[in-house]
Every structure is written in C-alpha cells, then in structure tokens.
C-alpha cells in the first residue's frame, strides 16, 4: 500500500490548479479535498434533480480517476448496485494519507 503525506497531496492539488487541469469550483476539487481530509469512498455517478421528469445522471468517474492518476493516488473501483446500474459505481482509495 502506498502512502502520501497531506502536505505533498495539497501541493500536487495546487499544481493541478495552477496548470489549469482542475478548477477550484469543480466537484472533483472538493472530492480531492475530502480525500486529503480522510474520506476513503466516493460515488462518482450521481443524479441531480428532484422529479422523474427533470432528473439528470452525472458521471464524473473519468475526471476523478484522471486526477487521481495525475496525483499518483492508488484506488480500486467497483459496482454494488443489485442489477449493475451506473449509480452503484464507487471508488475506494487504497493510498494511505498521513499527517
């Protein structure tokens, strides 16, 4: 299992922002901050909207895994939906983040 210090993870995140590969306003940026804070499981496919007529499915899996690859963070992925639906996809971070 790979380890990474919080300070070096924050530096890598800042570098991605400076290189304009990631925006501070994006949901991916907030997920990476949660990862640095200690979260281990993420659901990159989610819905927005409150009705059957106006709900939208968002898939941020490729963007999130690309950022994880650029930051050299290891992860595993899977799907826990009973019929294999897209909203059951998850990413578990295997890299240990130290203080």
Image (spheres, helix red, strand yellow):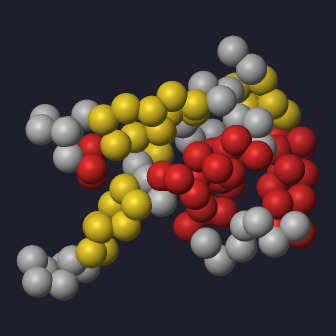
Is residue 34 visible from the viewing direction of this image? no
* Horizontal and vertical percent position of residue 67: 68, 51
Residue extending farthest top = 1
Q: In which quarter of the image is residue 31?
A: bottom right
Q: In this view, does 75 lie to the left or right of 82?
A: right
What's the residue at 40%, 40% (across, down)? 90
Apparent side of residue 29 relative to residue 39 in the rendered image (left or right): right
Q: Estimate the x, y position of residue 35 in percent, counting from the top left.
A: 63, 45
Q: Is residue 87 left or right of residue 10?
A: left
Q: In this view, does 70 lie above or below 96?
A: below
Measuring from the top left, give residue 52's x and y in whole percent.
9, 77
Q: Is residue 43 above or below residue 4?
A: below
Residue appearing at x 89%, y 44% in the figure: 7
Q: Is residue 56 visible?
A: yes
Count the labels in the image. 0
7 up-or-down from 94: above or below: below
Q: Position of residue 9 (x, y in %)?
A: 82, 44
Kindly indicate the quadrant of the structure image that contains residue 99.
Answer: top right
- Determine the residue located farthest toward the bottom in the rendered image: 54
Residue 36 against residue 54 in the figure, above or below: above
Q: In which quarter of the image is the N terminus?
A: top right
Q: Which of 53 and 25 is in front in this view?
A: 53
Q: Residue at x 25, y 34 (%)?
A: 80
| Foreground residue among 62 and 76 | 62
Seen at 48% across and 59% down, the residue is 60
């Amino acid at each position: 299992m790979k380890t990474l210090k919080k300070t070096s993870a924050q530096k890598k995140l800042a570098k991605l922002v400076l290189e304009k590969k990631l925006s501070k306003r994006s949901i991916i940026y907030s997920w990476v901050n949660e990862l640095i804070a200690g979260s281990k499981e993420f659901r990159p496919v989610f819905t927005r909207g409150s009705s059957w007529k106006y709900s939208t499915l968002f898939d941020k899996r490729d963007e999130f895994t690309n950022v994880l690859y650029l930051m050299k963070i290891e992860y595993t992925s899977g799907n826990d939906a009973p019929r294999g639906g897209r909203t059951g996809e998850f990413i578990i971070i295997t890299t240990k983040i130290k203080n």
